[in-house]
C-alpha cells in the first residue's frame, strides 16, 4: 500500500489518491468529459503501477505519479484527456521555473486601453497608491470619486457609439469579461443609452443552462467548479440562441441551484422588433456558444479592471486582485459565502479566465475599463482586517498556496492606503455599488 509521497520541495506527505482522480477529472472537463468512473479507473491503474514498482520502504515522487497518469490515460485510449493533462502539467512547470506560459499569450493585453488608463491616471494624480492616500489626507477624495465615475462614463459612451454604428444588423450583444469586472452594471448603463434610439435588451440567463450538479467535478474540499464553460450545456445554448435570432418562440430551462438540477421551465422567450438578445456571461465569447451565428449579427463588449496604479515598489496593482476584492465583498453580502471561501476558490476562477476568457479579448468590438482607483481604500475598510489572518492561515497549507500568495500581495497593497469608511459619498448609480450594495439598480 502506498502511504506517502515525496513532493518536489523534498517534503514527505500522506498519499492521497483523491488528488490523482481530481487532476484526471479536471483534464477531462477541459476537453468536454466529466465521467468520474473513468477517472477512478485510471487512478486504479496508477495506484496499481505504483504498488508494483514499490521496493521496501521506497516512496514515490510527484513526478513519478504524473508520469504514470499520462501512461494510464494513453493506454486506456483517453488521448484528448492525456493531452490536456500534459499541457496543464507543463504549464505549471513553466510557472515554477518563472518562465512565460506557452498557452496564454501576452498579445491579449489591450495596450491602447492601458495607455488611455495610464494617461488618465497621470493627469489625475492617482498613478501611485501613495497619491490615492494623499487625496484622502488632503480632502480631495470626493473629487477623485467624481473623476473616476466620469472616466467610466466616457468609456461607456465610446462603447455605445461603436454599437450604434451597427444597430441595423446587430441582433445579439455579448457582454463578456472575467468575474467581478462589473458586467451587470455596464449592461444596465449601455441599455440606458440605447433606449432613446428605440432599442432595448432582452437578457437570457445562461445560468439556467448549467448541467446537473452530479456531472460537475469537485476539488478535494468538495468545492464545485462552476467557472468552466464545460459546466454549461453548450449545444443547447447554441440551439437556443439560433432559434431566438430567427424570431422563434423558445422555452428556457430552469436551473434549481438548491437541488443542483435543471427542473422544468423558467418561461418562454421571443424577440420583437427593436429588441436585442443580451448575453451577459463569463463565457460569452466562448466560440461554441454562438457558433454558426453570422458575425455581423454579434457585437462583443469586453469589461475588465484595467488598473494602472502602482504600489510603493513600482509594481502595478493586479487586475485580478481588484476583482477578487470585489467578489469577496459581494459574496459576503449577497451569497452567504465567506471571504475565506472566496479566496480559496479563486484559483478555479483564474484558471478558467486564463483558459477561456482572456484569450478571447482580442475578438472584442469594444473594451470598457471598469477600474475605479478610489475603490481600494473602501475595500480596505471592508476587508483589510481579514488579511493578516489569511496570510497566517494559508501559510502552512500546501493546498492553499495560491490563496496565500494573493492574500500576502493584497495585504501589502492595503498597508499603503488608509481605509475609507463613509460610503455615502459613492454615487448610488456607481458600478462599485454592484459589489458593496446600496445601488439604485435592481440586480
Image (spheres, grey):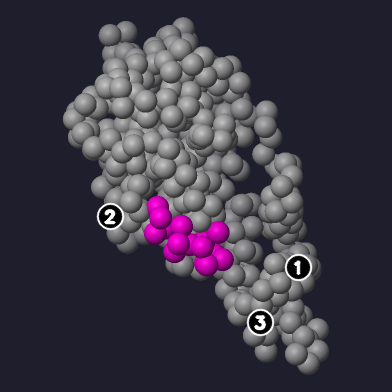
Is 297 situated above or below 75? above
Most frequent secondary structure within the magenta stretch: helix
Q: Which tag is nearer the camera, tag 2 or tag 3?
A: 3
Q: Earlier in the sequence, mark 3 or mark 1?
A: 3
Direction from residue 144 to residue 413 in the image, left or right: right
Classify the position of the C terminus by image quarter: top left
Is 199 situated above or below 12? above
Instruction: Using the numbered discs, state the Cα–Cα distance from disc 1 to disc 2 in whole angstroms.
Output: 39 Å
Q: Position of residue 305 (x, y in %)?
A: 46, 30
Q: Residue at x 48, y 27 (%)?
A: 128
Q: Residue at x 69, y 35 (%)?
A: 105
| Residue 389 part of the magenta-drawn span | yes
| Residue 242 part of the magenta-drawn span | no
Q: Residue at x 56, y 35 (%)?
A: 313
> Do callouts 1 and 2 mark residues in contact (Cβ within 8 Å)?
no
Label of residue 336 in the image:
2
Query: What residue is pinned by disc 1?
Result: 63
Instruction: Using the numbered discs, state the Cα–Cα distance from disc 3 to disc 1 in whole angstroms.
Output: 14 Å
Q: Which residues are magenta?
A: 387-401
Q: Position of residue 277 (x, y in %)?
A: 39, 26
Q: Residue at x 45, y 40 (%)?
A: 413
Of residues 131 and 40, the one nearer the viewer is 131
Q: Position of residue 267 (x, y in %)?
A: 28, 41
| Crowding near the residue tagged with mark 3, few <14, some 14–19, many ≥20 C-alpha atoms within 10 Å | some
Label of residue 4 in the image:
3
Of residues 341 and 87, the one nearer the viewer is 341
Q: Is residue 221 visible?
A: yes
Q: Position of residue 126 (x, y in %)?
A: 43, 22
Q: Is residue 248 visible?
A: no
Amino acid at each position: 500500500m502506498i502511504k506517502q509521497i515525496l513532493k518536489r520541495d523534498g517534503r514527505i506527505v500522506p498519499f492521497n489518491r483523491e488528488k490523482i482522480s481530481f487532476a484526471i477529472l479536471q483534464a477531462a472537463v477541459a476537453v468536454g468529459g466529466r465521467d468520474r468512473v473513468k477517472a477512478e479507473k485510471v487512478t486504479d491503474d496508477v495506484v496499481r503501477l505504483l504498488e508494483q514498482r514499490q521496493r521496501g520502504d521506497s516512496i514515490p515522487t510527484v513526478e513519478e505519479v504524473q508520469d504514470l497518469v499520462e501512461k494510464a490515460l494513453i493506454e486506456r485510449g483517453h488521448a484528448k484527456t492525456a493531452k490536456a493533462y500534459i499541457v496543464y502539467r507543463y504549464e505549471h512547470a513553466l510557472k515554477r521555473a518563472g518562465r512565460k506560459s506557452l498557452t496564454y499569450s501576452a498579445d491579449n493585453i489591450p495596450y491602447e486601453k492601458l495607455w488611455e488608463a495610464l494617461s488618465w491616471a497621470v493627469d489625475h494624480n492617482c498613478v501611485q497608491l501613495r497619491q490615492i492616500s494623499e487625496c484622502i489626507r488632503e480632502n480631495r477624495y470626493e473629487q477623485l470619486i467624481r473623476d473616476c465615475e466620469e472616466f467610466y462614463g466616457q468609456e461607456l459612451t465610446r462603447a455605445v457609439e461603436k454599437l450604434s454604428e451597427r444597430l441595423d444588423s446587430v441582433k445579439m450583444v455579448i457582454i463578456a469579461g472575467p468575474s467581478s469586472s462589473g458586467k451587470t452594471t455596464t449592461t444596465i448603463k449601455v441599455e440606458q443609452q440605447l433606449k432613446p434610439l428605440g432599442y432595448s435588451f432582452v437578457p437570457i440567463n445562461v445560468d439556467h443552462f448549467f448541467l446537473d450538479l452530479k456531472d460537475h467535478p469537485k476539488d478535494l474540499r468538495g468545492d464545485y467548479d462552476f467557472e468552466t464553460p464545460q459546466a454549461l450545456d453548450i449545444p443547447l445554448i447554441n440551439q437556443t440562441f439560433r432559434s431566438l435570432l430567427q424570431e422563434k418562440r423558445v422555452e428556457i430551462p430552469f436551473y434549481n441551484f438548491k437541488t443542483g438540477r435543471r427542473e422544468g421551465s423558467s418561461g418562454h422567450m421571443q424577440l420583437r422588433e427593436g429588441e436585442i438578445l443580451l448575453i451577459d456571461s463569463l463565457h460569452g465569447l466562448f466560440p461554441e456558444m454562438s457558433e454558426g451565428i453570422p458575425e455581423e449579427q454579434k457585437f462583443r463588449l469586453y469589461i475588465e479592471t484595467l488598473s494602472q496604479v502602482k504600489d510603493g515598489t513600482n509594481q502595478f496593482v493586479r487586475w485580478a486582485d481588484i476583482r477578487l476584492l470585489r467578489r469577496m465583498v459581494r459574496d459576503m453580502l449577497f451569497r452567504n459565502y465567506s471571504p475565506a471561501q472566496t479566496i480559496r476558490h479563486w484559483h478555479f476562477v483564474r484558471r478558467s479566465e486564463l483558459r477561456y476568457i482572456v484569450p478571447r479579448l482580442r475578438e472584442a468590438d469594444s473594451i470598457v475599463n471598469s477600474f475605479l482607483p478610489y475603490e481600494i481604500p473602501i475595500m480596505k475598510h471592508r476587508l483589510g482586517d481579514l488579511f493578516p489572518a489569511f496570510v497566517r492561515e494559508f501559510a502552512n497549507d500546501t493546498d492553499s498556496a495560491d490563496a496565500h500568495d494573493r492574500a500576502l500581495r493584497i495585504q501589502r497593497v492595503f498597508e499603503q492606503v488608509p481605509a475609507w469608511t463613509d460610503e455615502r459619498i459613492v454615487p448610488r448609480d456607481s458600478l462599485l455599488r454592484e459589489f458593496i450594495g446600496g445601488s439604485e439598480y435592481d440586480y
